Every structure is written in structure tokens, then in C-alpha cells.
Image (tube, rainbow, N blue to C red):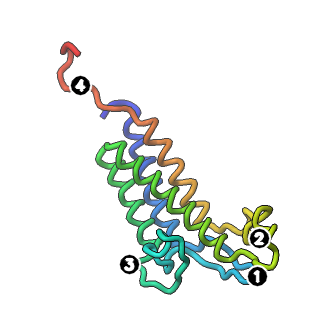
């Protein structure tokens, strides 16, 4: 390995593990009509059509998809393929953003029509729990590590490029 590859590979693997584990933790704290919830029982197929359905088995949940994206980032870090790490990180950020947006939209207060523009579902940053912060920061850091990672040197030294 060339200098600089090993630290970024380790960082990509750690970020992949943190992204996958963050999908299993609680994401949003309870407030008003909104329960304390995570991604582990929210239907992934229904989320793609912007419908929040809870109570699904883990294998069909958004948490399982986040776990798979974390594994994809780890495989990208171990194999040296920056593309796998980037794809896993970008998709994890997209899934996380969509889940937070869907949850905020689902638990919006209908009696205050203008409050949506001010603060959707009264969801301040302090209501985001460890799973959200762990997943978002690890996916973002994994994306940065994929951009920082250096490519491989040519196999034959002195060859004309």
C-alpha cells in the first residue's frame, strides 16, 4: 500500500461500521404526538413513496438498509475501491435525510398551518438522538475519506504513461 492509503481505509471501515450501527439506534426523541423512534421498524418500501409505516420486521426496515449501506462502506474501505465507499456514504446520507424529512412531515401539527415553514413538527436539533448524529457524521466523514484516498501507482515503474 502506498503512504496515506491505510489510514483512509481504516477511517472508511470505521465510518461504515458507525453508519450501520447508527441505523439500529434511536433517532428522534418523543415530543407531543411524536413517539421516540428509530429506523429499525420503519418500512423502507413505503418510505420510498413517502409514507411512514412502522411495525415492520427488521429485514424490511430502513435500519436494515442503513446496515447494508454501512457494510458497503466497509467493503469499499477493505477492498480499496473508493467508489463503493462513496456510493454507500451518499446513499446513507440520502436515506437518513429522507427518513428525517418523512418523520417531520408525518408528525406535523395540522392546527398550525404556518408553523410548518417555521419549525416542521417542532423538531429542533436537540430532539435528534445518538443514532441520527452517529449515522450522519460517519457517512459524511466516510464520504470525505473516499475523496481523500489516493489511487494506486502504476504497476510498472518507468513505463511511458
Residue 128 at x, y percent in the picture: 67, 67
Q: Earlier in the sequence, mark 2 or mark 4?
A: 2
Residue 112 at x, y percent in the picture: 82, 74
Q: Secondary structure at mark 1?
A: loop
Q: Is residue 116 left or right of residue 50?
A: right
- Image point (52%, 66%), residue name: 22
Return the residue at label 1: 32
Q: Which mark is residue 122?
A: 2
Asked whether the residues under the numbered discs 1 and 2 touch, taking CB atoms below 8 Å apart as contact, a structural biologist would say yes
Compared with residue 50, is residue 32 higher up or lower down, i.e. above or below?
Answer: below
Q: Which quadrant: the C terminus?
A: top left
Q: Earlier in the sequence, mark 3 or mark 1?
A: 1
Compared with residue 49, is residue 73 higher up or lower down, i.e. above or below?
Answer: above
Q: Secondary structure at mark 3?
A: helix
- The crowding category of the residue bearing disc 1, from other C-alpha atoms within 10 Å (few below 14, some 14 to 19, many at least 20), is few
Mark 3 or 2, which is nearer the eye? Answer: 2
- Image point (38%, 64%), residue name: 68
Return the residue at label 4: 154
| Residue toward you, 6 or 153 | 153
Q: Earlier in the sequence, mark 1 or mark 2?
A: 1
> Gap between marks 3 and 2, in whole Å?
30 Å
> Gap between marks 1 and 2, in whole Å?
9 Å
> Gap between marks 4 and 1, in whole Å?
60 Å
> Gap between marks 2 and 4, in whole Å?
54 Å
Q: Is residue 23 left or right of residue 70?
A: right
Residue 109 at x, y percent in the picture: 76, 77
Q: Toward which corner of the image does residue 98 lie, by quadrant?
A: bottom right
Return the residue at label 3: 59
Mark 3 or 4, which is nearer the eye? Answer: 3
Amino acid at each position: 500500500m502506498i503512504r496515506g492509503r491505510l489510514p483512509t481505509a481504516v477511517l472508511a471501515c470505521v465510518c461504515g461500521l458507525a453508519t450501520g450501527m447508527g441505523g439500529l439506534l434511536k433517532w428522534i426523541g418523543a415530543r407531543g404526538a411524536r413517539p421516540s423512534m428509530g429506523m429499525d421498524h420503519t418500512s423502507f418500501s413505503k418510505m420510498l413513496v413517502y409514507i411512514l409505516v412502522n411495525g415492520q420486521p427488521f429485514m424490511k426496515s430502513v435500519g436494515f438498509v442503513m446496515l447494508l449501506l454501512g457494510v458497503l462502506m466497509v467493503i469499499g474501505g477493505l477492498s480499496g475501491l473508493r467508489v463503493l465507499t462513496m456510493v454507500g456514504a451518499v446513499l446513507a446520507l440520502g436515506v437518513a435525510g429522507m427518513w428525517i424529512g418523512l418523520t417531520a412531515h408525518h408528525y406535523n401539527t395540522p392546527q398550525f398551518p404556518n408553523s410548518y415553514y417555521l419549525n416542521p413538527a417542532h423538531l429542533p436539533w436537540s430532539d435528534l438522538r445518538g443514532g441520527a448524529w452517529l449515522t450522519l457524521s460517519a457517512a459524511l466523514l466516510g464520504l470525505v475519506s473516499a475523496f481523500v484516498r489516493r489511487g494506486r501507482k502504476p504497476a510498472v515503474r518507468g513505463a511511458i504513461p
